[in-house]
Amino acid sequence: MSSFLWLIFFLCEYILVNISYAQDFFMKKLVYVVLIIILAIITVNLTGIIIVFNYKVPKNIVETEKFRAFEMDVQSIVKADKFCSKNNIDRSRLLAAYYIFSDCSLDQKNFLLKEYKMLNTNYTNANKIEYAKVCKAMSAIFDDLKYFPVAKSSVSDDWVAFEDSFGADRNYNGAYKHEGTDIMAENNISGFYPIVSVTDGVVENIGWLEKGGYRVGIRADAGGYFYYAHLSSYGNIKKGDKIKAGTLLGYMGDTGYGKTEGTNGNFDVHLHFGLYIKTDNYDELSINPYHILKYLETKLIIANY
């Protein structure tokens, strides 16, 4: 208990002990009023302590494996869209509050305005700085999303498939953990599927990587870094270009896993899609993009190919 509360405690004890000695009715009444005020102050302070305890945001929670696994189902994201549009609420802040409250696992959540306001206020009061980090992370993840990264053919039934493989074991020049989602070509034909930018942004990286093959990295406006790897070729883009969501980045391929530029054929045709955020201790920290991709599955660009 803080020294302030100890002082209040002893002051109350003093008043209670001496109240019987107050001879004047007015003085007795005044003492009671003072006592009520003191008790009210104690109640407010205790309430603040309870809020801090119950709504504490762990330091750098966005860097934890549990947060990065990003267990947030599509139904919850869609409901958040509708709820925020109806109530004029920032979606990223809403999802931040509920994601923390549900211990980083948001499953088919129904949102309530009164509950959200309570959560937002309490998290802000309990730990404004750490809560702001979560809101910033959610903004980097969600604010710029517009399209699924693979354009769908208007004439062909060939499509793609993907599973949640974030954190799965991989091996090339040593074991490592998978930091994205592999969107597999059902026809396994390199150069067939157009890859488009999920967001507006800037082409921050483009070119060959030994592991990722021909890759493109887009820095979106809210800070998220969207990574597209194993392309067969590029669209008409270059480093530093400002692009719009839906811009052709290139075509799905099977390049990579080779020191020599152009190495291909070491795995099936697919797009490795990655999502990264900047935190206190990491310039690029991977976030599981699986549920984001499930959310974007209905936001398709239809192309003539």
Image (cartoon, grey):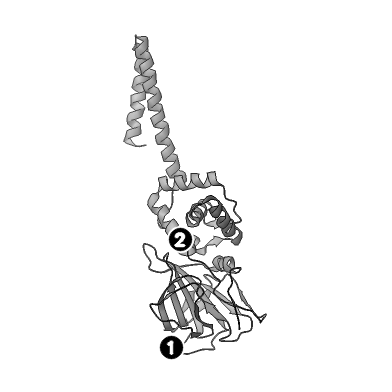
Is 174 located above or below residue 77 in the figure? below
Amino acid of disc 1 = Lys
Left-right relation of 249 to 294: left
From the top left corner, tell me how far across and down residue 195 is, in percent.
53, 79
Rendered residue at 59%/59% (across/down): 78
The N terminus, quarter of image: top left
Image quarter where the C terminus lies is bottom right
Residue that carries the numbered disc 2 in the rendered image: 139
- Which residue is labeled 1 in the image? 259
In the rendered image, is residue 299 in sight? yes
Vertical position of residue 252 compared to residue 4: above or below:
below
Choose mark 2 or mark 1, whichever is in front: 2
Which label was assigned to residue 130?
none
- Tell me the residue at 44%/81% (across/down): 237
Dot 1: what SS?
Answer: loop
| Residue at the image point whose x is 47% and y is 44% from the top | 54
Q: Nearer the viewer, residue 182 or 215?
A: 215
